[in-house]
Image (cartoon, rainbow, N blue to C red):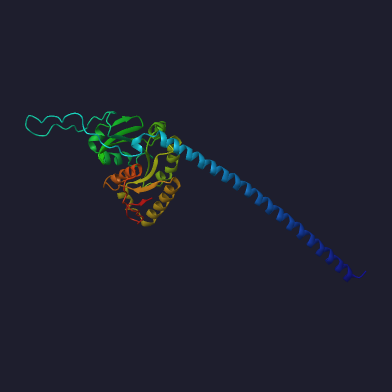
Amino acid sequence: MSIEKRQRRRRRRRSKGQVLMAKMIGKSRRRTAELCHTMVHQVNVHCNLFHRLSFLGRFIWDRILLCYLPSPYLRLPLPEPPSAPPPPATAHGGCPPMHAHPIITPSDSDLVNLKISLLGDCHIGKTSFVIKYVGDEQEKISLQMKGLNLMDKTLFVQGARISFSIWDVAGDTGSLHQIPMACKDAVAILIMFDLTSRSTLNSVVGWYRKARKWNQTAIPILIGTKFDDFVRLPPDLQWTIVTQARAYARAMKATLFFSSATHNINVNKIFKFIMAKLFNLPWTVERNLTLGEPIIDF
């Protein structure tokens, strides 16, 4: 047999082997694709079932909350006419004496108590933020416990008295045991960070998880403090912090506010936002995403 014939046979054998190998590879790929498709379909089925059950569970839980939540959380109560006569005038003919801090008893029918929780790292301005809202006089009579600071403020809205009870949890590790008591029954949870400290911004997710472990229904609000110092940072660093803060707020389904207790920026506005969310009141504030201005994102 000549050399040319042998080479031809070898080429035929190689071509046949290559064809067989290609067929085997094609079959293997098709089987792999079919297996992956089957697995993805099964996962999708399980995910759809899980989402349906989760939706059903949330629907049932919402109906239970709707039935058992007290009426102040559903609508503002109407004030009742006072049954007692007004106090007499002073001997000098002036107005009756006014108490700086009126005593509010649970029997008051027009009083709505709202509990607010504040969480965040140490030295980020939580206490300064609360003092700016409640005032220095209320700060003097605040209740201070180990790792916890309680302040109150009462205001009138549509004829009803709204009493904010603000629970400020210290940010050190020794105060973590106060989180369950501070978050339980709160209507809003304020997760706070220092706009000039990236480490405190990175901690907000952990604080959010700790809060949600004890309260699943409170309104989440993400607040960046010390905006007056933040605007002095380089623009590229400001943009990085704004982008990261907005991403965290979206992940937590929270409204984002940049604030300053020193210049009273967005402090009162945050509590007005809480009132509007709770009682379906008009809210006219618009989003502000302009770099160099106090961000409001919702």
Q: Residue 248, relative to residue 164: is it above or below?
A: below
Residue 256 visible in the shown view: yes
* Residue at the left extreme of this rendering: 92
Query: Which image quarter holds the N terminus?
Result: bottom right
For residue 25, side relative to residue 103 (left or right)? right
Looking at the image, which residue sits at the far right?
1
Q: Identify the residue shown where x is 57% and y is 43%.
A: 49
Please state the horizontal and vertical placement of residue 14, each as a whole percent of the image: 82, 63
Q: Quadrant of residue 139?
A: top left
Query: Which one is nearer the viewer's eye here, 28 or 115?
Result: 115
Q: Where is residue 113 in the image (x, y as percent from the top left)?
A: 31, 34
User: Image quadrant of residue 69?
Assistant: top left
Residue 293, percent across and down?
A: 32, 54
Residue 47 lies, in percent from the top left, at: 57, 45
Indicate whether 25 appears above or below 154.
below
Closer to us: 143 or 69? 69
Residue 116 seen from this side: no
